[in-house]
């Protein structure tokens, strides 16, 4: 899944090696132009079709592929201005700088326009549609299914479901994620969504606060992610009975058909692993953004993907294995947004089911005690396990879960 998203991201940002086999135009004869672009190249550009411009990038500063000086298109000595600008564009110019920071000698990079277009277009558009789509599905589910009630009615007795450390870790993760989601949405939608409502000055202050909160709350999110993983990973390992739960959709769409489940059912396991895997990924890209140019990861990832032939699975050429520091940052920002939107969509559904969507569900993370009938209906195998441990434990001892 993550590999496919990476390939899609590379294609969306228009990386030069990302043309599909079907889209890559045949290499025309450029002998008449001295290796420069042809009329066919110009026409394809005017029509918005992809152009393989490696003939320009690879030939930068190479007199062996240029037209001779006796030719009408030949140079009359030295590098022409277009040659200089082309070298700057592709990062091949010999530039010196007074600082040694990464990217200091890169004066021009043509991936910035593609990154901005992706951020302002597909990322924001499809991310927004995904969030609104999930909200719409939950509203439709509520109208058709209604609130999921305890079928046997409240038992009046409770059983401990989560200990204080588990609830603390959960709420630390949930609270930090909600703050990160809100502040992230303010940053990505604010320029075109909030300025018209609250004005530029108010939005400037709001964006500054959002950035500070986002950067600092991220540490709490990463800490909580580790705690949750350590506490629950063993209980969330796949089991063959999860297939039965998935086949019946956990009884969410019908009554009197709750399949047996342990402490975590298959749906909760999917949420757990989605949060862990996507959380690690969004944290990695977030760290790359917090420490600019210090944690490049996409060039190495593309190398690994190329080695297993992953681009060819969807008809792409090998991904670029050499990226500028700026391109690394742009890819990290784009990936950060993609994964964040995916997590927001998943967590919205989780919040609904764990609060107003199911009777008795919130109590599990409220005070840690859940109604016995609720536990039997949704986690029958876990209840049997706890009750068996209670019978086997010495009198007065607390059974371990």
Image: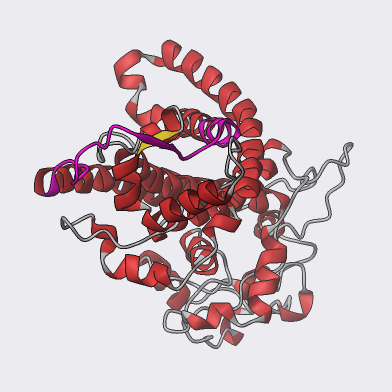
- How many numbered badges does the structure rendering display? 0
Residue 46 place in picture, x, y as percent: 37, 65
Q: Is residue 30 magenta?
A: no
Q: Position of residue 348 (x, y in %)?
A: 35, 41
State the residue lying farthest toward the front: 395
Residue 271 placement, left or right of 355: right
Residue 42 screen position, x and y as percent: 44, 70
Residue 330 relative to residue 74: left or right: left
Residue at 71% in and 55% down: 324
Residue range corresponding to the magenta coloring = 145-171
Residue 114 appears anywhere in the view: no
Rendered residue at 49%/34% (across/down): 174
Please report the residue visible at 50 percent of the width from the left and 29 percent of the height from the top.
Answer: 175
> From what the image shows, is residue 374 above or below residue 40?
above
Asked which quadrant contains residue 139, the reply is: top left
Q: Report x, y in % for residue 230.
A: 65, 48
Does residue 33 appear to the left or right of 90 in the view shown?
left
Q: Residue at x 36, y 21 (%)?
A: 195
Residue 212: which quarter of the image? top right
Q: Is residue 270 placed above or below 101 in the rendered structure?
A: below
Q: Nearer the viewer, residue 246 or 39?
A: 246
Q: Residue 166 in magenta?
A: yes
Q: Is residue 310 above or below residue 271?
A: below
Compared with residue 58, is residue 230 higher up or lower down, i.e. above or below? Answer: above
The one of 354 and 293 positioned closer to us in this rendering = 354
In-front residue for pair 330/110: 330
Q: Relative to residue 79, is residue 346 drawn left or right?
A: left
Q: Nearer the viewer, residue 326 or 367?
A: 367
Q: Is residue 111 visible?
A: yes
Quick one: which residue is furthest to the left in this view? 144
């Amino acid at each position: 899944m993550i590999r496919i998203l990476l390939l899609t991201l590379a294609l969306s940002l228009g990386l030069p090696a990302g043309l599909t086999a079907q889209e890559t135009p045949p290499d025309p004869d450029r002998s008449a132009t001295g290796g420069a672009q042809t009329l066919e190249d110009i026409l394809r550009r005017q029509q918005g079709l992809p152009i393989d411009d490696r003939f320009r990038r690879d030939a930068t500063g190479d007199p062996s592929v240029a037209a001779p000086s006796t030719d009408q298109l030949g140079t009359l000595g030295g590098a022409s201005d277009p040659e200089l600008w082309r070298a700057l564009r592709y990062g091949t110019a010999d530039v010196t700088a007074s600082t040694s920071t990464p990217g200091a000698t890169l004066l021009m990079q043509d991936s910035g326009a593609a990154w901005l277009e992706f951020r302002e277009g597909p990322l924001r558009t499809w991310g927004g549609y995904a969030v609104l789509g999930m909200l719409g599905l939950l509203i439709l589910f509520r109208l058709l299914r209604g609130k999921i009630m305890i079928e046997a009615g409240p038992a009046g007795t409770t059983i401990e479901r989560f200990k204080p450390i588990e609830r603390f870790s959960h709420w630390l993760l949930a609270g930090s994620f909600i703050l990160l989601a809100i502040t992230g949405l303010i940053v990505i939608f604010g320029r075109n969504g909030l300025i018209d409502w609250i004005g530029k000055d108010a939005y400037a202050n709001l964006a500054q606060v959002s950035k500070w909160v986002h950067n600092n709350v991220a540490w709490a999110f990463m800490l909580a992610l580790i705690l949750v993983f350590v506490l629950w990973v063993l209980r969330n390992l796949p089991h063959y009975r999860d297939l039965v739960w998935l086949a019946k959709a956990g009884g969410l769409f019908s009554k009197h058909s709750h399949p047996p489940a342990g402490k975590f059912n298959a749906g909760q396991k999917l949420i757990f692993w989605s949060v862990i895997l996507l959380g690690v990924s969004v944290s990695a890209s977030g760290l790359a953004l917090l420490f600019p140019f210090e944690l490049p990861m996409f060039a190495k990832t593309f190398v690994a993907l190329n080695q297993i032939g992953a681009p060819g699975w969807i008809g792409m050429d090998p991904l670029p294995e050499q990226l500028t520091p700026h391109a690394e940052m742009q890819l990290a920002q784009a990936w950060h947004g993609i994964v964040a939107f995916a997590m927001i969509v998943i967590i919205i559904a989780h919040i609904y089911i764990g609060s107003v969507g199911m009777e008795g569900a919130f109590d599990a993370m409220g005070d840690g005690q859940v109604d016995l009938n609720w536990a039997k209906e949704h986690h029958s195998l876990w209840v049997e396990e706890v009750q068996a441990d209670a019978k086997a434990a010495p009198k007065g001892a607390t059974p371990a879960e």
